[in-house]
């Protein structure tokens, strides 16, 4: 959450909320060129002096305008997944009990509503940041891991290494709820996982269906 905290600090808003309209408004009006560097510096206790690292905080999609402006060399990747599988996965994961911005996932239907708002915001970012966001589909990575991995590296202007497909054998630090999955490597058992729950999924399915995600 380093970028989130640096935005709050830079905005110097009076609100106690980490994420608020006042904070985002003030931050968007700031011309503080140090925000990007302050963010990078704040990561160094964990990332050391590595020239590349990944920050996959779920809330990053809210800040893409600021990220693009203050980190012009950052490569922004949006991993898309089947809406139903995304919602079920979020509902199953307790992200943080003390962080109010994840409380939407306490309710399965709220997960669906949140997903649709996420999609609307991503459409907005694609409109005002043409070419800055690389979309990739989860299901495509599972089906063609080497092909999609090469495409990602090409977008990031990084060279291919054979151990890119053996990331689960690496010893690097993973400080996210997906740490266990990272050590498993690529697997396909979560594709269409939502269908295992049968008719219980119908109320949720109606939400993305009404938004045109399903025929």
Image: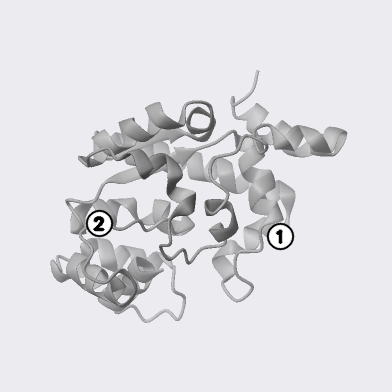
Picture quadrant where residue 47 is located: bottom left
Q: Residue 79 location in percent, x, y?
A: 45, 40
Picture quadrant where residue 50 is located: bottom left
Q: Is residue 98 left or right of residue 31?
A: right
Nearer the camera: disc 2 or disc 1: 2
Q: Residue 77 location in percent, x, y?
A: 36, 43
Q: Residue at x 23, y 51 (%)?
A: 74
Residue at the far top: name it: 215
Q: Residues within 10 Å of mark 2 (few under 14, many from 20)?
A: few
Q: Is residue 174 left or right of residue 92?
A: left
Position of 213 relative to 93 (above/below):
above
Position of 104 relative to 214 (above/below):
below
For the residues labelled 2 and 1, the Cα–Cα distance comes to 34 Å
Q: Residues within 10 Å of mark 1 (few under 14, many from 20)?
A: some
Q: Is residue 112 visible?
A: no
The coloring applied to the image is: one colour
Q: Quadrant of the N terminus?
A: bottom left
**In the drawing, what numbered circle is on residue 106?**
1
Residue at the far right: name it: 199
Q: Nearer the viewer, residue 150 or 67?
A: 150
Q: Residue 119 location in percent, x, y?
A: 49, 39
Q: Earlier in the sequence, mark 2 or mark 1?
A: 2
Dot 2: what SS?
A: loop
Q: Residue 123 location in percent, x, y?
A: 40, 36
User: Which residue bears the numbered disc 2?
Assistant: 52
Q: Residue at x 56, y 40 (%)?
A: 116
Dot 1: what SS?
A: helix
């Amino acid at each position: 959450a380093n970028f989130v905290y640096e935005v709050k600090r830079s905005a110097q808003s009076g609100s106690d909320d980490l994420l608020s309209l006042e904070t985002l408004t003030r931050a968007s009006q700031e011309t503080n060129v140090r925000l990007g560097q302050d963010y990078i510096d704040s990561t160094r206790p964990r990332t050391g002096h590595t020239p590349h690292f990944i920050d996959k905080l779920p809330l990053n999609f809210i800040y893409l305008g600021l990220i693009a402006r203050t980190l012009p060399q950052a490569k922004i990747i949006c991993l898309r997944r089947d809406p139903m599988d995304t919602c079920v996965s979020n509902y199953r994961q307790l992200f943080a009990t003390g962080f109010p911005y994840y409380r939407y996932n306490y309710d399965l239907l709220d997960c669906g509503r949140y997903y649709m708002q996420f999609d609307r915001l991503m459409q907005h970012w694609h409109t005002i940041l043409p070419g800055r966001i690389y979309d990739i589909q989860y299901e495509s990575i599972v089906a063609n891991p080497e092909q999609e991995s090469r495409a990602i590296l090409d977008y990031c202007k990084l060279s291919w290494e054979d151990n890119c497909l053996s990331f689960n054998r690496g010893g690097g630090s993973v400080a996210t709820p997906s740490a266990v999955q990272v050590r498993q490597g690529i697997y396909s058992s979560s594709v269409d996982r939502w269908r295992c729950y049968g008719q219980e999924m119908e109320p949720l399915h109606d939400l993305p269906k009404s938004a045109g995600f399903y025929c």
